[in-house]
Amino acid sequence: TGKMGFLGFVLVGPTLHTWFGMLHRLIPHQGTTGVLIRLALDQTIFATSFTCVMFSAVLTLDGKQKEIPSTLKRELWPALKANWQLWIPGNFINFSFVPLRLQVLFANGIAVIWNIYLSMASHR
């Protein structure tokens, strides 16, 4: 719990703040088209790379850096499938209805569930 809280404070929060701001600057379109484009970018470019970062960070904090390649090989695809089940609907709601200044807060609420999954997956 402490490690995930630490990662949320120093890694996830600042990264999401930067990412969501950049998405809205790159794709300023309002409405469904803008939401779908932001969602597609989020779930292809960001989700894949940041899932790798999170697995690596958790294992590094556990002192298990040597396990990063094998864990990613074993857990990345299942994690991405789980990510899409949670984050596609979650960020569709987030990008559609939540003001930009509150989107990180909304995402952090969803991230509680996601972080439980990532912690369990990285420790299998």
Image: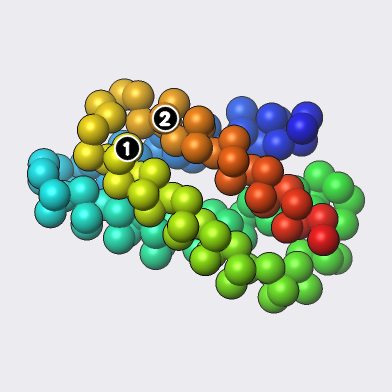
Identity of the residue drawn at 58% across and 45% down: 114
Identify which amino acid the numbered label 2 is placed on: Phe
Q: Quadrant of residue 91?
A: top left
In the drawing, does residue 117 fall left or right of residue 104?
Answer: right
Residue at 36% of width from left, 31% of height from top? 103
Q: Is residue 78 visible?
A: yes
**Residues packed near mark 1 inside 10 Å, few (<14), some (14 to 19) or many (20 plus):** many
| Mark identifier at residue 106 | 2
Mark toward the start of the polypeptide (1 vs 2):
1
Relative placement, left or right, of 54 versus 93 is right
Q: Position of residue 71 (x, y in %)?
A: 75, 68
Where is mark 1, residue-wise?
94
**Are dots 1 and 2 in contact, CB under 8 Å?**
yes
Label tally: 2
Check the picture and name the quadrant holding the C terminus. Answer: bottom right
Would you call the spot at circle 2 few (<14 residues within 10 Å), some (14-19), or many (20 or more)? some
Residue 42's label in the rendered image is none
Is 85 drawn above or below residue 91 in the view shown?
Answer: below
Residue located at (32% from left, 37% from top)? 94
Percent of width and height locating residue 81: 52, 66
Q: Position of residue 60 (x, y in %)?
A: 80, 51
Position of residue 115 measured from the top left corner of the image (x, y, whole percent): 64, 43
Note whether residue 22 is visible: no
In the current view of this chain or complex, which residue is farthest to the right? Answer: 63
Residue type at tag 1:
Asn
